[in-house]
Amino acid sequence: MSYPENRVDLQLAHSKRKKDSSRAPYDHTKYVASRAIIMQDWADILDALARGDSMSGVMETFGPLSKRRRALLKVIERE
């Protein structure tokens, strides 16, 4: 779905080796607003697919050119 990789990695708790491991606990609080939007999108995508919505409909609603994506990008700009 082309969500920002750094937000997805933080949300999934993927970690990359860092020289300063003392910063790792603080990474969990980074980008909370945009990560919450991404998680809500994911829940709504799963609901849409469970309802039987088409993938093209899901992409129209949640894809890179959707209104929801533009709203997410505005939040990312503020973070």
Image (spheres, grey):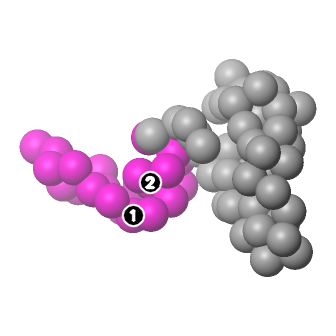
Image spot of residue 28 (x, y percent): 47, 59
Residue type, label 2: Leu
Q: Mark 2 points at which residue?
A: 10
Q: Is residue 51 above or below residue 4?
A: below
Q: Looking at the rendering, in which quadrant would you find the C terminus?
A: top right
Mark 1 touching mark 2, by CB under 8 A?
yes
Left or right for 28, reference 14:
right
Task: Examine the image and state in which quarter residue 15 appears.
Answer: bottom left
Q: In this view, does 16 lie above or below 52?
A: above
Task: Examine the image and state in which quarter residue 36 appears.
Answer: bottom right
Disc 2 element = helix
The answer to whether residue 33 is visible is no
Range of residues picked out in magenta? 6-30
Task: Examine the image and state in which quarter residue 75 appears.
Answer: top right
Q: Mark 1 points at which residue?
A: 13
Residue 54 vs residue 37, the one in the foreground: 54
Q: Is residue 52 above or below residue 79?
A: below
Q: Looking at the rendering, in which quadrant would you find the N terminus?
A: top right
Residue 34 vs residue 54, the one in the foreground: 54
Residue type, label 1: Ala
The residue positioned 83% from the left and 39% from the top of the image is 60
Residue 72 vs residue 77, the one in the foreground: 72
